[in-house]
Image: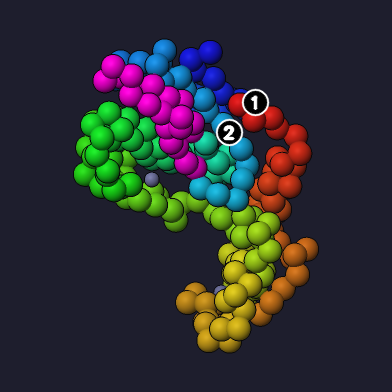
Amino acid sequence: MQFTHNADHPLEDEVARVVRRYFENMNWPFERLPIGIDFKARTTASDSRIVDYELRDVLLHGKVRIYFNFIFLLQNESAFIRHIVPHEVAHVFAQAESYRRGITIKEHGPEWQKWLATISADAIQAAKGPGDIFDDRSIRLFKGGTPIRCSCPGNDGYKVIAQSSEARLSEVVCPKCEVGYAKTGRDDAPPEVMCFYEYLANETSVRSDI
Ligand SMILES: [Zn+2]
Ligand SMILES: [Zn+2]
């Protein structure tokens, strides 16, 4: 049980294979630092860390936990595999280095950048990754955000803002149609938003943890 995951979708299997290859290529000591990958539709961004770690005879032991947000994987698998996957794997390598050397590092500092460049030449060297590629409207809606609409037709005119921003709604206009936004109902959400919203609603009840 040195490499485990809860993939139940072909795209998740693909991600698990890619992750395994990154670690194998760097001669990762799976026996000391077993890897567990958790695929979930959640409201939080993908994340990775080494837990329960300790140095024994100068060798690092612990458990690697990587969580990938299935919503964003499903929305754009090529961007996810190209950018998000190496981004999270590089965090694990950088953390292992910092724990082994007993130093504190910045989350997206030079050590992380070095590892990211080592494992993937194409991945974006930015803390947020290619944020704009992914659509977080379903997540905002699920977290109780306020759906609003401008005059742009269909999917383009639908946005979700945080409840706390509602008071300033009258101050902004859509740069495209130049019309202000008005609150709209949840049932006005385009199908591409509702589809991911349902993933979020179901995920909490159906899928097991690793
Ligand atoms: Zn990061
Ligand atoms: Zn508009």
Q: Which residue is mark 1?
A: 8
Secondary structure of the residue carrying tag 2 is strand
Q: Main secondary structure of the magenta part?
A: strand
Q: Is residue 106 left or right of residue 6?
A: left
Marks 1,2: beta carbons within 8 A: yes
- 169 up-or-down from 17: above or below: below
Magenta residues, as a range? 46-66
Q: Quadrant of residue 82?
A: top left
Task: Give the x, y percent position of residue 137.
Answer: 60, 59
Residue visible at 52% across and 28% down? Answer: 37
Report if residue 63 lies within the magenta region: yes
In the image, 209 versus 195, the foreground residue is 209
Residue visible at 32% across and 40% down? Answer: 123
The span from disc 1 to disc 2 (Cα, nearest Å) is 9 Å
Asked if the residue at label 1 sits under 8 Å from ligand 1, the reply is no
Residue type marked 1: Asp
